Image (cartoon, rainbow, N blue to C red):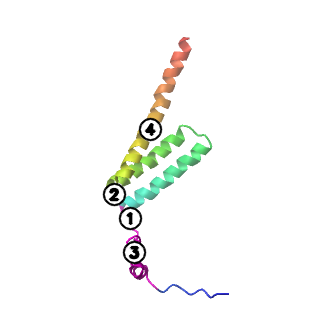
Amino acid sequence: MKEIKPITEKLDDKIKALNSTRVYKKVTPMHDLSWYVKWVSVVFVIAGWMLHAVNLYPMNVAIQMIGVAGWLWVGILWHDRALIVLNSIGVALLGLGLLNYWVGKNRCQTILKRK
């Protein structure tokens, strides 16, 4: 059986040795405001999915909206257009869903009572 040797070379040295333009070190910020917002938002989005799986509507939409709004904030902090566009649309659609639930539901019940 082949013996496994411990890694002694540093990541920077490995990247230089590859002499490639396709290999990069991680560039996202760590332990700044955006890092904390990002991970808290991930927790909210996953919690929203979990609530969705057990059909706890509209709580799932509200929780997901908090997470998506957090990711929108991260996109703004990072000046990342893809995150901004994706999460702006997400906040708008989730917000419309909540608005429809709270306002539209009462309106529909009123219309049905008239008939």
Instruction: Give the residue type that dot 3 points to.
Output: Ser
Q: CA distance from mark 3 to mark 2?
A: 26 Å
* Residue wearing tag 1: 28
Q: Is residue 66 above or below residue 29?
A: above
Q: Earlier in the sequence, mark 3 or mark 2?
A: 3
Q: Secondary structure at mark 3?
A: loop
Question: Do callouts 3 and 2 mark residues in contact (Cβ within 8 Å)?
Answer: no
Residue lying farthest to the right in this orientation: 1
- Between disc 3 and disc 4, whose residue precedes? 3
Query: Magenta stretch containing residue 70, yes or no?
Result: no
Proximity of marks 2 and 1: CB atoms separated by less than 8 Å: yes
Q: Which residue is mark 3?
A: 20
Q: Position of residue 82 (x, y in %)?
A: 38, 51
Q: Tell me whether the residue at label 1 lies in contact with that at label 3, contact meaning CB atoms closer than 8 angstroms.
A: no
Residue 37: quarter of image: bottom left
Residue name at image x 48 percent, y 86 percent? 8
Task: Give the mark, 2 or 1, whose residue is nearer the N terminus.
Answer: 1
Q: CA distance from mark 3 to mark 4?
A: 42 Å
> Residue 19 lies in what quarter of the image?
bottom left
| Label at residue 78 | 2
